[in-house]
Amino acid sequence: MKSHAAFVYGDELMQYKLGDDHPFNPIRVKMTEELLRAVGNLSSEEILKPRVADDTEILAAHSVDYVNFIKSLNTIEADEDRLYGYGLSEEETPVFANMHEAAKIVCGATLTAAEAVMNGTVKHALNLSGGLHHALYGKASGFCVYNDAVVAIRSILKQYDIKILYVDTDAHHGDGVQWAFYEDLNVCTLSIHETGRYLFPGTGGITERGAGQGLNFSFNLPVDAFTEDDSWMECYEQAFLRVAESFRPDLILTQNGADGHYYDPLTHLYLTMDTYRKIPLLAHRLAHEYCDGRWVALGGGGYDLARVVPRAWAQIWFAMTEFTPSDNRLPLKWTEKWQKYTTQTIPTFWNDPHDLYEPIPRKEEIEYKNASTLRNALYILGGEEIGNRFRRN
Amino acid sequence: MLVREMIDPPKAVVTVTAQQTVSDAICLMNEHKIRHLPVVDKDGFLIGIVSDRDLRDASPSVLENQAGSRHDYPIMEIMTKHVITGTPDDFIEDIAALFHEFRISCLPILSEGKLYAMITNSDLLNMFMHITGANEPSSHIELKLEKHGKSLYGALRILEQMHIGFSNVLMYKGIHQDCNRLVIRSNTMKPDRLAAELRKEGYEVLWPQEKQ
């Protein structure tokens, strides 16, 4: 492989589709792949074809009972009560054709990325179809059927004696991954998300710190609605830096949901492309600082398909390949193609305008509350004395 | 509910400075009947906290000769400097989790670094009482709602039809999680006719109980 980074992609990943009108749409991955090619930053040699996960690998993350039920949906129509019990419902996570197989392809793609990094083929690997972080041990949740990150981490830990840092910047709490490794001291999870007081799934408070041997190996930063770029970045940077410094990972796995953007219909964080440009840069830096470059990045949420997700996800690949587009405008042929499929206007530029939205009136209070949350969340890492930190000139 | 809504307006907070002594702090605690004192600098910024236990640990035993008393010790030497704090914009449910997780019984609330209020565990218990509506004149109606059975909406409609008001509604999962408990604080002194109507409509009424 010519590059030191791999982009996992194949059209079969489009099979994980919850419905035409469902907000979680795999077309985002295809749009991003085409955008990167259009800008001349992705070549066929850098593409890795995803393998399919086998049932044993899925069963390392999910109960036999649940996996059997998902499999059975190919042939049997289950009643509403049973579906509901397994986290499936028409409105949220509906049953779709070949769900078991499609979800196995997504897990396989994440395994492909993780294996390429672990066996030294590449330093960094990106699977944008992955990051299904809500899937739980015995049930589907929040558009996620099988938890590809848990499947991949379990598979790596079976082969290598290493420490893995999982960092989740989706606007929603990375609950499925957190609970899977809640008592595990080899996997440290850090999730920064819009507070569960407002947003699904409701968990991710700072007091969820792990249990048993895994106590103090789970970190959560629930930030307020209307957080905006500056305060969000302050929380992300401080938390990521200090957790990495104390945990000293051998591999960094990031979940890069792009649903915290101002345009996102489901959340209220008011982030802009500025944040989405900086998120992967820090992951890249710390992967080199602690892990000899080993970094696996996944996709996740992101429900403004045309205006946000491809632009935001392209930034991850830019960070992996240390690339900066020479033109501040998106490639015209890409924009023209995808504009036909959407009623929203695809932006002209990579970055957002400075007047994207009206200023938030409670900005100072929100920043102050987030700084307090950050301090309490990192309390166990020891730290500065109060007073000075909060003193403002 | 946010902290700033729970303590509106905030009460004045009793504080000490780091230079004051252990005996000053003991006097202040006794005078105001409190068990925690925030330590602030001259500009009102929080720099630490002392509890009655810190002060007891720093006091000589009653069995010893009082001559060796260290009551003149400055607070700076014994205060806790690494303090868990909250802000006026925190949700009270999040604050409650902090009390539980960090096993503390008092939380300084800071606004821009300055002390805004002190919240104690009894403030939280008081708020819990308020939320249950148990401190207002009203009658307790308690129903058991099975998973696919009668609804909250249906129960409240019966109250409306009978022109019975209510001050609180609290629904929570039963201990065994198999059903929901619905507690209504109704504004009636005669809840029996309401209970009878609810039973007639098929509700399982846990309280008031039927007279034998």
Image (cartoon, grey):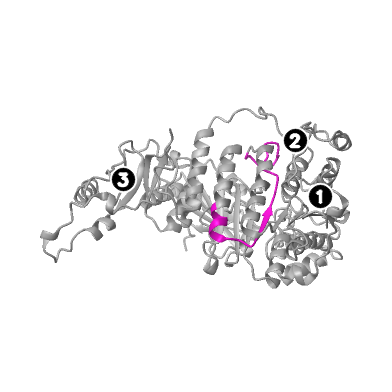
Is-magenta flag for residue B77? no
Q: CA distance from mark 3 to mark 1?
A: 55 Å
Q: Which residue is mark 1?
A: A26
> Residue A115, located in which quarter of the rendered image?
bottom right
Taking depth in this image into account, of B196 and A319 the one nearest to the observer is A319
Q: Which residue is mark 2?
A: A350
- Looking at the image, residue A9 sits to the left or right of residue A176; the answer is right
Compared to residue A151, the image places residue A194 above or below, namely above
Taking depth in this image into account, of A222 and B3 the one nearest to the observer is A222
Evaluate if marks 3 and 1 touch, with contact meaning CB atoms under 8 Å apart: no
- Looking at the image, residue A169 sits to the left or right of residue B60; the answer is right
Compared to residue A108, the image places residue A340 above or below, namely above
Q: Which residue is mark 3?
A: B39
Q: x, y (%) of residue A350?
A: 75, 35
Which amino acid does the dot numbered 3 rest on?
Val
Where does the magenta region start and end?
A: A242-269
Which amino acid does the dot numbered 2 rest on?
Trp
Q: Are marks 3 and 1 on the same chain?
A: no
- Which label lies toward us, 3 or 2? 2
Q: Earlier in the sequence, mark 2 or mark 1?
A: 1
